[in-house]
Amino acid sequence: MRRYVIHITLLLSIFAGTLCAADDFIVVSYNVENLFDTHHDSLKLDSAYLEGGEYRWSYTRYRRKIENISRVIANICEWSTPSLIGLCEVENGHCVRDLVFGALKSYRLGYVHYEGPDIRGVDCALLYNPDVFELIASQPIQVPLPDNERPTRDILYAKGIAKLSSQTRDTLHVFVCHLPSQRGGAAATDDKRQAARQTIQHVVDSLQQVDSTAKILVMGDMNSQPADNIGGLHNLMTDMPDDTGSHKWHGTWTHLDQFYASQSLMPFIVTTYIYKSSEMLCEDDKYGGNKPFRTYSGPVYLGGYSDHLPIVMRINNKK
């Protein structure tokens, strides 16, 4: 039976300064851990998430996963409508639509998703509030890897007019990323992540050559610890305490999920934080403390949320 962990200090951190007001421009980045539907895609390796597959996936479990994700987003935003939500590990547009037009329909969100080349079928998606982010253009950006390497996930790019302040609407360039994993070891796979970062860097450089004051936001699961390794952008997670994190690996909290912002965007940002609630955590019996309450532990179904916690950026557009 699952045991819930409630920390008073955690609850205080949520209610002291991180609650979102009605005038906030709220950005969420969330790796939702394998949001798969129950339909087979013959071009992808999705058999583990079919009803007769390894995980004994089912429509009931899928709906619970959708409801869990929507509950997290609703709790983050509290009295507000989310402005931008970057998602990692969604299988396809069907899953995104089930979120947007189903569990999150009261928010009236738009979305951007492209079917990518990842062999497992996981992609990135961007949900947005059209009242504060008017989408102008979007495209997937492919990460070039050697021919003998499996293709990795595309980087999702979206350009829109964002209401970052009450006086002005600014062009905002948004990138949603899920960089290659460390499966096989960090050192052995770093060249793949470096290729993805270089791809982002190339586009960021192009944008800043045209407009040195371009407002740029990069978010997602970077699959490495925070560093200022995209030129012209600040990594907002570099100053996070070492004993916090959005992901836990072998007893150690890590900050795999990150925000990068251009200098021109920094004055608008009020705070960034990792969102936690008691229902999203469970006891870490092996290493102590707590850890994210995920959907599966190996092949064993737990019914939780994700192996990651969402990160949140709050911009107060009263400025």
Image: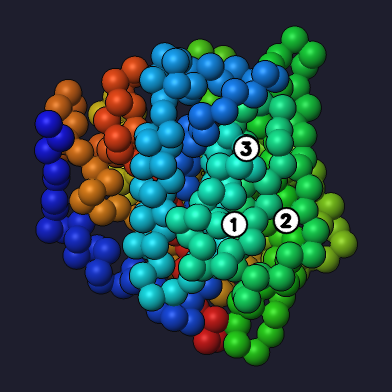
Residue at 55%, 56% (x, y): give it.
Answer: 100
Question: In the rendering, at what x and y percent does residue 203 appear?
Answer: 79, 48
Picture disc at residue 158: 2
Question: Image height check: is 54 above or below 258?
Answer: above
Residue 229 seen from this side: no
Question: In the rendering, at what x and y percent does residue 132 appear?
Answer: 62, 75
- For the residues marked 1 and 2, what is the alpha-carbon distance in whole angstroms? 11 Å
Task: Label 3: state its secondary structure.
Answer: loop
Q: How is the image coloured?
A: rainbow
Q: Looking at the image, is mark 2 or mark 3 nearer the viewer?
A: 3
Question: In the rendering, at what x and y percent does residue 143 appear?
Answer: 74, 31
Q: Which residue is mark 3?
A: 92
Q: Earlier in the sequence, mark 2 or mark 3?
A: 3
Total numbered circles: 3
Q: Which residue is mark 1?
A: 127
Question: Image height check: is 111 above or below 53?
Answer: below
